[in-house]
Image (cartoon, rainbow, N blue to C red):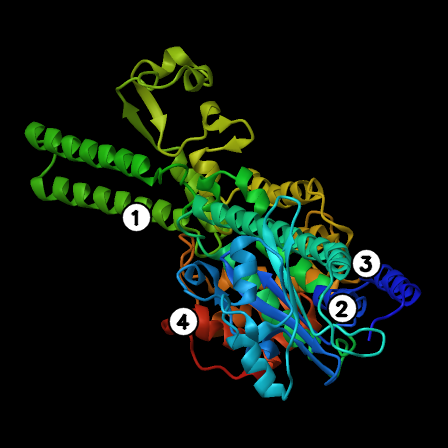
Amino acid sequence: MQYDASSVLEEFLSISDNIVKEADYLTSISKIIKLTGHTCGAEVGFFYTLSDDKFLNLEYSYNEKLNINKFGSDNNLYQSSIFIPESRNKTLKSAAEACVLNNEIINLNEIYSSNKLDNTFFANYDSLNNYISISLLTIPLVNRKGYIIGVIQYVNPKDSKGKNIAFTKEMQQEICALSNLATLILENRKLSEDYGQLLESFIEVLARAIDAKSPYTGAHCQRVPVIARMLATAAVQEENGPLKDFEMSNDDWYALNIASWLHDCGKVTTPEYIVDKATKLETIYNRIHEIRNRFEILRRDAHIEYLKKRLANVAPQETLQAEFVNKIKELDAEFDLVAKCNIGDTPLTNEDIEALEKLSKKQFVRYFSRAKGISWAERDHMEDLEAASHPQFENLLQNRKDHILGQYNRGELYNLKVRNGTINKEEREKINEHIIVTIDMLKALPFPKELSNVVEYAGAHHERVDGKGYPNGLTGDQMSIPAKIMAIADIFEALTANDRPYKEPKKISQVLAIMKHMKDSGHIDPDLYEVFIRSGVYKEYAEQYIAKEQIDEINPEDYL
């Protein structure tokens, strides 16, 4: 039965008012489809979408007489997806297929009387619902660029007395006008999805580019989102304790995903040699080889000195041999000290520092000019170009003026004396700077309001709950739970990674022992850490992403 104009207008205004509030586009579309059908009293309506890969999908159907409403995949009962390019080869096509292929409106008084269309769809629909389809109107939904993005079909219009009638030209015009609203919603949804996919693709490309800078951290930006999602899910599922009321909206989940992908985007400005610095003397290459060559020189000098003394018979042969052997042993021990200090696996002691400083004063003779074969920029950094051009005694371990380049200090002794790890003070500042760059980069992006938390989530993954982190020294009370989740995810991925040149792969037991210490010392949030352990997030991640030889048996209670 047809609705009167005032009823249709009232319903149209109601729908228009609620469209902007409706999160599910299909709910809005269904209301429009029904309203449009009401203008002509159509008993049945079908709504199809046409995807970018040319699949025609039945997304919504209703039957007023039988009080049936089906959404999404429930409509597969009537019609599976249709691949439009294959439809071109069919002798008979369905009304929906013909509508798309020919971009035409199809208006039939008698569905089953047409011998130019395949009516299998309606025969199946009628059989399943014990219904009789008679008249049909099929309309293509065309966007502003002239592309078909969907199809609407109506069946069996009624007059004011409830009698079956055919679709008139006036009805067709009204339906076409009202269906434009469905086209607009569908087009806006498509644009929104396309921009969303573009944003996510850009984010992933940027993250992969950051990982690709280093052959050793090629999965970090891809795996931190996995751990963050696992831990956030576990926190949301908590029914007791401090996190029992923690919830995340769809926007929160999306923001956390983007933030975890982009948390290290500032590393695009961090030199690779710092990110990958496996030893203290490493820049573009490991400069331990230069120092080893100096030891080679000293050893050769010792051998020459021994041979000279033998020829001059200054002492018995046995005495000279013993003296030479002791000298070689001394050089071996000294080089072993330099090599050990260069690795950075264990913290240096005061005795190690003193031994390095004493050794640095040992000298060798350099004969070839240090001013040759270098760039003008390097030459301008030399303190005494004249002295560098002539043979002279030089210290075995050096800190020279030309070792200082901009903010970086490449002094040999300076770097060897780094007490923990391989990174010196200036390099650590440069690495930490990536957080500031990350925050600045993300602030420059025009995120919509619902994603405004991306900057906070991504920019806080090096903060500590005791306020001793960076860049802002935030305390736990000043950080959101997703930001604290990011910190734990970043740490766990870095500790379990087996592709870092500056550390050997660690067992799960070793990683959790380190994280327990970090929890006890105020580095990471204790409540989230407990969820991380008790929920088995560490184990779930390990089984999927960590090498089997790193996974050992542990008792979770030992790490709480």
> Which label belongs to residue 20?
3
CA gap between label 1 and label 3 equals 76 Å
The crowding category of the residue bearing disc 3, from other C-alpha atoms within 10 Å (few below 14, some 14 to 19, many at least 20), is few
Q: Is residue 10 above or below residue 438?
A: below
Number of on-image labels:
4
Which residue matches tag 1? Answer: 333
CA gap between label 2 and label 4 equals 63 Å
Q: Give left or right: position of 478 versus 333.
A: right
Q: Decide which of 104, 18 is in the foreground and name it.
A: 104
The crowding category of the residue bearing disc 4, from other C-alpha atoms within 10 Å (few below 14, some 14 to 19, many at least 20), is some
Q: Identify residue type, mark 4.
A: Gln
Which residue matches tag 2? Answer: 37
Tag 4 and tag 1, C-beta contact below 8 Å? no
Q: Give left or right: position of 178 versus 526.
A: right
Q: Is residue 528 above or below residue 194?
A: below
Q: Identify residue type, mark 1.
A: Ala
CA gap between label 2 and label 3 equals 22 Å
